[in-house]
Image (cartoon, rainbow, N blue to C red):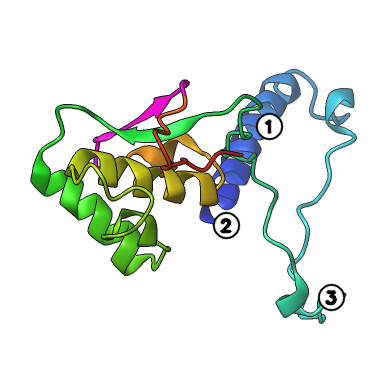
Amino acid sequence: MRMVKCFYSLMVVIILASSSWSMAYDFQEPPSHNTKLQEPPVPTTEEPPVPISELQEPSVPSTESPPPQEPRWCTASVGASSVALQDAVDYVCGKMGMDCSPINPGGACYFPPILNYHASFVMNRYYQSRGRNLWNCDFNGIGSIAITDPSYGSCIYDHM
């Protein structure tokens, strides 16, 4: 609201400045270019026509990228540290509560028991379930988008 008031005040100053220039030569008649100026709206204490709880947020352009049409997978970068990989697994399987049973002993993606493979599987599961947006594959910089299916053996990576 403050920005609107400042803008309105600036507009008034500009209009007054342009008006005073043209009025300098003729004080009898108002300048013709100022005849359509309007008074600012007067604040009112009336109830709004819609309850405030039902008012919608202003429309903001969406920053979401549409899901790609071709299959994409989220995988862990080859050079990622074991700490960063374990953090990704803990986040997806623990905090987000996703089903990570395929990377547990006896699961389809347990062998080989390599942390990078396990992290890639759960990071992809998270990425696919959250709409396949680039930011859903970041994982503090260790995620990367793959265009070839990283599935192997009986370990099938989700894709939409």
Question: Quick check: 115 above or below 50?
Answer: above
Task: Give the Cα separation between the discs numbered 1 and 3.
Answer: 35 Å
Let me know if residue 100 appears in the view.
Answer: no
Q: Quadrant of residue 30?
A: top right
Task: Give the Cα separation between the discs numbered 1 and 2.
Answer: 21 Å
Q: Amino acid at mark 3?
A: Val
Instruction: Please name the predominant secondary structure of the magenta segment in the image.
Output: loop
Say which residue label 3 marks: 50
Q: Percent position (x, y) of residue 80?
A: 15, 34
Q: Which of the numbered marks, if any, corresponds to residue 105?
A: none
**Tags 1 and 3 touching, CB below 8 Å:** no
Front tag of 3 and 2: 3
Front tag of 1 and 3: 3
Q: Earlier in the sequence, mark 1 or mark 2?
A: 2
Q: Which of the two residues, 140 or 8, is positioned nearer the viewer here? A: 140
Residue at 30% in and 67% down: 94
Q: Amino acid at mark 1?
A: Ile
Say which residue label 1 marks: 15
Instruction: Classify mark 2: helix, strand or loop.
Output: loop
Let me know if residue 4 appears in the view.
Answer: yes
Say which residue label 2 marks: 1
Q: Earlier in the sequence, mark 3 or mark 2?
A: 2
Task: Give the Cα separation between the discs numbered 3 and 2.
Answer: 20 Å
Instruction: Classify mark 3: helix, strand or loop.
Output: loop
First to last magenta residue range: 139-148
Image quadrant containing the C terminus? top right
Residue at 65% in and 39% down: 61
Q: Amino acid at mark 2?
A: Met
Instruction: Classify mark 1: helix, strand or loop.
Output: helix
Front tag of 1 and 2: 2
Question: Quick check: 42 above or below 17?
Answer: below
Image quadrant containing the N terminus? bottom right
